[in-house]
Image (tube, helix red, strand yellow):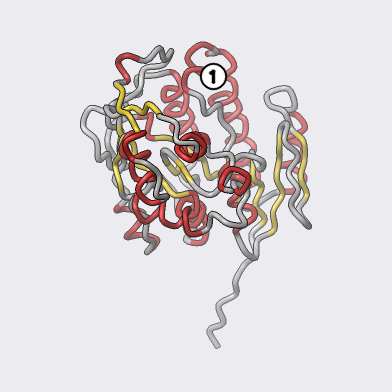
């Protein structure tokens, strides 16, 4: 008899109270989870959650990994604000690079696979439609530290790097979507960049992609992004259309006129065909994704702004 035994994985989610970590943990079935959080207490039923503030609590994390010996360590911890990273380089380098290095060393010793969430910002954005094997060339400090971390993690061939971008979904933690909905709902104008582009990624698609990659025991690099390469202006226009808001309230502005500290790549859009073929998954277009958010607007934690 050829019986397929489904192995329940023990997964340690670093950054369990963050947008991706929280959604992945609450929506993944039949795995044994442990999560960490920094400030926002996670409240998952039947899941151990440990308060760890890096880099201060490094020894606490090391102890946790060695004690639990997880099959997978999903590292979704990062300073996600590029402007913060640009002006706080030491903290950024410590969290993104040094801590990644320490985690990699420990996980290699106990044979735990690292799944590291990375970014489209490892590219300079000059050509767009980047494949996994395209040469990285970050133009801001956030991208630079993520690029360094990727290279450290991939020294162990078992490890996995998943690059994603512009994640949106039915969560109050999605800042840009929330900003668009809150303002358009009140008939207020919004200014949105029309000259930088990213692969807009539905949160459900990303967490489903992470689950699939773990199931397939994948390694190396995969692009886990939506199928539309859009500007913030296109994104906001789509929201207005799907939600029946006034589209004329969405005004285009140029990134050139902004006072941002970190330079943004113009078109770092990622090609997702490797992930689609390997894991047999579908990524939503921007239209499909926003429609899904709209259809599920009742009973979700964004409810307080949709009334």
In the image, farthest residue toward the left:
127
Q: Residue at coordinates 47% horizontally, 61% vertically from top-left?
A: 216
Residue 218 location, x and y as percent? 45, 54
Estimate the x, y position of residue 40 in percent, counting from the top left.
72, 36
Visible in this render: residue 221? no
Residue 297 visible? The answer is yes
Q: Is residue 282 above or below residue 249?
A: below
Q: Is residue 141 left or right of residue 63?
A: left
The image shows a total of numbered marks equal to 1
Give percent across and percent down for residue 295: 48, 59
As drawn, which residue projects farthest toward the front? 187
Q: Which quadrant of the figure has residue 7?
A: bottom right
Residue 119 falls left or right of residue 3 = left
Which residue is pictured at 32% across the width and 60% down the height?
Answer: 277
Q: Residues within 10 Å of mark 1 (few under 14, many from 20)?
A: many
Residue at screen point 21% across, 32% down = 127
Q: Is residue 93 left or right of residue 22?
A: left
Quarter of the image with the N terminus is: bottom right
**Front in this rendered view, residue 63 or 292:** 292
Relative depth, front residue between 227 and 245: 245
Q: Is residue 4 above or below residue 184?
A: below
Q: 147 and 245: which one is in front?
A: 245
Q: At 27% from the left edge and 27% from the top edge, which residue is drawn?
A: 195
Give above or below for 177 relative to 265: below
State the image quarter where residue 193 is shown. Answer: top left
Residue 272 percent coordinates (x, y): 32, 49
Q: Secondary structure at mark 1?
A: helix
Q: Which residue is mark 1?
A: 93
């Amino acid at each position: 008899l050829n019986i397929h035994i489904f192995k329940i994985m023990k997964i340690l989610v670093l950054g369990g109270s963050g947008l991706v970590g929280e959604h992945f943990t609450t929506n993944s079935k039949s795995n044994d989870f442990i999560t960490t959080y920094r400030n926002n207490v996670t409240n998952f039923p039947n899941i151990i959650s440990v308060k760890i503030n890096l880099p201060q609590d490094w020894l606490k994390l090391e102890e946790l990994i060695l004690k639990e010996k997880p099959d997978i360590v999903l590292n979704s911890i990062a300073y996600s604000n590029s402007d913060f990273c640009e002006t706080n380089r030491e903290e950024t380098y410590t969290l993104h690079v040094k801590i990644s290095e320490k985690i990699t060393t420990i996980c290699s010793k106990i044979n735990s696979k690292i799944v590291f969430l990375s970014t489209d910002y490892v590219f300079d954005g000059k050509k767009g439609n980047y494949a996994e094997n395209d040469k990285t060339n970050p133009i801001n400090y956030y991208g630079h530290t993520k690029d360094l971390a990727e290279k450290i993690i991939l020294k162990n061939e078992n490890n996995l790097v998943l690059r994603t971008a512009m994640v949106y979904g039915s969560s109050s933690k999605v800042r840009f979507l929330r900003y668009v909905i809150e303002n358009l709902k009140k008939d207020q104008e919004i200014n949105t960049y029309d000259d930088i582009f990213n692969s807009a990624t539905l949160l459900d698609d990303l967490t489903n992609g992470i689950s699939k990659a773990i199931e397939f025991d994948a390694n190396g690099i995969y692009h886990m992004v939506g199928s539309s390469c859009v500007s913030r202006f296109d994104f906001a226009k789509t929201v207005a259309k799907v939600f029946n808001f006034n589209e004329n309230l969405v005004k285009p502005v140029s990134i050139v006129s902004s006072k941002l500290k970190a330079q943004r790549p113009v078109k770092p859009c990622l090609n997702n065909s490797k992930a689609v073929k390997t894991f047999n998954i579908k990524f939503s277009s921007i239209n499909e994704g926003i429609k899904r958010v709209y259809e599920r607007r009742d009973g979700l934690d964004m409810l307080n702004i949709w009334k």
